[in-house]
Amino acid sequence: MMQKLNIFDRVIAGIAPAYAMKRAVARKMLSFLDSGYGNYGANQTKKSMRGWFYHGGSAKEDIEDNLDVLRQRSRDAYMGIPTAAAALKTMRTNVIAGGLIPAPQIDGEYLHLDNEQVEQLQAQIVREFDLWADTPSCDADRVDNFYMLQQLAFLGYLMNGDSFALMHRKVHPGQPYQLCIRVIEGDRVCSPDGFDRLFPCEVQGTNVQNIVQGVETDADGAVAAYWICSRHPLSSLANQDGKLEWARVEAYGKKTGRKNVLHIMNRERAGQRRGVPILAPVLEALKQLGRYTDAEITAAVISAYFTIFIQSQSAADTRPIGEMLPPELLVDAAEQGTIEMGPGAVVNLNPGETVQFADPKHPNTGYDAFTNAMIKQIGAALEIPPEVMFKQFTTNFSAARGALNEFWRTCTMQRDWFVQDFCQPVYEEWFAEAVALGRISAPGFFGDPAVRKAYTGCIWNGPARTNLNPIQEVSAAERRVAAGFSTAQEETAQMTGGDFNRNIRQRMIEAIRKRQVDEIVNPTPKLQPEKLSDSDSSQKGL
């Protein structure tokens, strides 16, 4: 150790050996700290990094403990900042649009069904599902149909970080199915009395292991139940009487194992139980951009006013030339020291009073450039290209197509997640009721999970990808199908959002009708027997 000490340390070692040893150990530790990430992201000595305040925790400290503020700010941004509303509505429209439509994909090979039987059964399933999904009876509130409920649940997931749905059963006159869906806003799923339980205890007569933001987990960390408040915690009614009650709903049925609660969310970290609003990473930027926009609008409006201030030599009680602002237009009428401005207004001043204006030079020529730069950063964080956010494709064809393709990947990912969390579980629950009622024949459905999965296979078609050049897109689709890279069903879903088999059946009907109409409009002339010439007649007579 003494050989590694410099001359200064050796002198100290002779006087205070223990202090010299600490210096050597500290120097060795610094050599480790200043290596690898210690030179860059983890460096704590550079001036550029010493001002970086940081503090990390688990998913609970970083996410769940901040959800109440994040949800309220996200909703406020949606209601008051145009860019925030544009981002959420753009995502909703491109992922859900009018609703994701099921296209049954029965595994006929496993079920020993031929193609004709599979096609007939799939057509029957579609008809039965439309019987349930196209009416408000599928909504526990009896307001929306199933496709509108998709929009509600997805927008709630974007805005609040997650949304929930309960599957109830209720008899509706004239409807064969009892299944109905109740969409619940994320705020209502919360811990009883607003306090998380991080240790085993008893809550409302039930022994629980852990409750975080209304999600109860067992000893293994698996979701066991959800605690749902009887009212929205932020409701004015809840604040008046304070009578809030919590119902414990088990996540899965004890006998069937089917989901009782649908939790629509995407996890960012292991151990996370609640979702994060999609606007959370850009809330600060959105708020500042909203303030900047409001300030620019106000400045532009003030600059557009034409207000004249007249200064007289002596005070006068008479009205000045022109008219003052009418009382109904006064914003600060209660404040005596406020001078209102307005278009074409004339204001009288007292002797010695003057008005000095700053020259804001509005409209600001740098407003567009700055807001575009900010929206690019916000769009990058939300995976929404600025061309899609603005709904303006002013760049060249290749750039616009590239932006649409990148956004389509985001929409496809979001759609797949939403289908797994909401659409498919609802479809499977409805299918089970249809089989139980005997409206759909599915032998072995309740006896074998593999058979049940074979019957409930389904793909969900939504809004089609935007085509900038339809002719090229159709040609490319034809080549992919011809080469076996894709199928006609997949290409139809991507290009129009429709169903290929349904289109073919409709085309057959249209072709038959078209032939019938053509026959009526332009009837085929009947063939007349050829007239025989005299020579032919004579020869035939012979």
Image: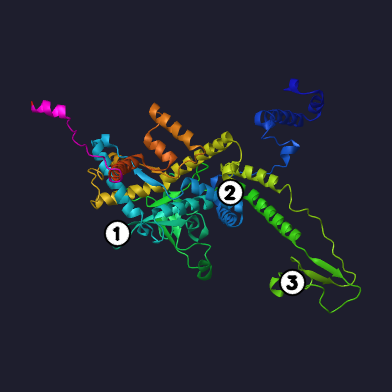
- Helix, strand or loop status at disc 2: helix
**x, y percent for residue 527:** 21, 36
* Any part of residue 273 in sight: no
The residue where tag 1 is placed is 175
- Helix, strand or loop status at disc 1: loop
Q: Nearer the viewer, residue 346 or 1?
A: 346
Q: From what the image shows, is residue 384 above or below residue 66?
A: above
Asked if labels 3 and 2 touch by Cβ distance under 8 angstroms, the answer is no
Q: What residue is shown at x 25% (from left), y 39% (from top)?
A: 525
**x, y percent for residue 170:** 32, 60
Q: Residue furthest top?
A: 3
**x, y percent for residue 448:** 26, 41
The residue where tag 3 is placed is 325
User: Would residue 148 be found to the left or right of residue 508 on screen?
Assistant: right
Q: From what the image shows, is residue 300 above or below residue 50?
A: below
The residue where tag 2 is placed is 280
Q: Amino acid at mark 1?
A: Gln
Find the distance from the CA under tag 3 to the CA under tag 1.
62 Å
Find the distance from the CA under tag 1 to the CA under tag 2.
42 Å
Q: Amino acid at mark 3?
A: Leu
**Mark 3 or mark 1, which has the lower sequence index?**
1
Q: Which stretch did the figure color magenta?
A: 520-541
Q: Nearer the viewer, residue 180 or 66?
A: 180
Q: Residue furthest left?
A: 542
* Any part of residue 291 in sight: yes
Q: Nearer the viewer, residue 449 or 517?
A: 517
Camera-side mark, 1 or 2: 1
Camera-side mark, 3 or 1: 3
